[in-house]
Image (cartoon, grey):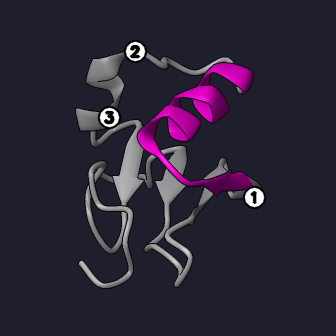
Amino acid sequence: MDEQPPVVVFPPSPDGGRQVTIHGKRVGIAHSLFDVFELLHDAGLPSEDRAVDDPELIEWRGGGPYDWSDTA
């Protein structure tokens, strides 16, 4: 893969929230997978369940889609 995926979900912060960027722009803080789906939907990107496993769409840093604690 030559290019970075359009969506990057950063590692959990101490409160468990994860910063989300789309095309390099910060779009919000997700506190759950549902929040990520909402941000994807708002941006017009695929937001169905299988989208979380698509490495061409989302890069998960510091844990995958089910990691929401900074102590994981």
Amino acid type of the residue that numbered disc 2 sits on in the rendered structure: Glu
Which part of the image, by quadrant, shows the C terminus? bottom left
Residue 59 drawn above or below residue 34: below
Would you name the residue on which mark 1 appears?
Answer: 26
Point out residue 57 in the picture as x, y percentages from the top left corner.
Answer: 41, 36
Q: Mark 2: few, some, or many residues within 10 Å (few <14, many ≥20)? A: few
Would you name the residue on which mark 2 appears?
Answer: 48
Amino acid type of the residue that numbered disc 3 sits on in the rendered structure: Val
Residue 37 sits inside the magenta stretch: yes
Q: What are the residue bounds of the magenta stretch?
A: 28-42
Q: Are marks 3 and 1 in contact (CB under 8 Å)?
A: no
- In this orientation, which residue lies closer to the viewer: 55 or 65? 65
Amino acid type of the residue that numbered disc 1 sits on in the rendered structure: Arg
Point out residue 55 in the picture as x, y percentages from the top left corner.
Answer: 28, 42
Marker disc for residue 52 = 3
Per the model, the C-alpha gap separating discs 2 and 1 is 21 Å
- In this orientation, which residue lies closer to the viewer: 24 or 13? 13
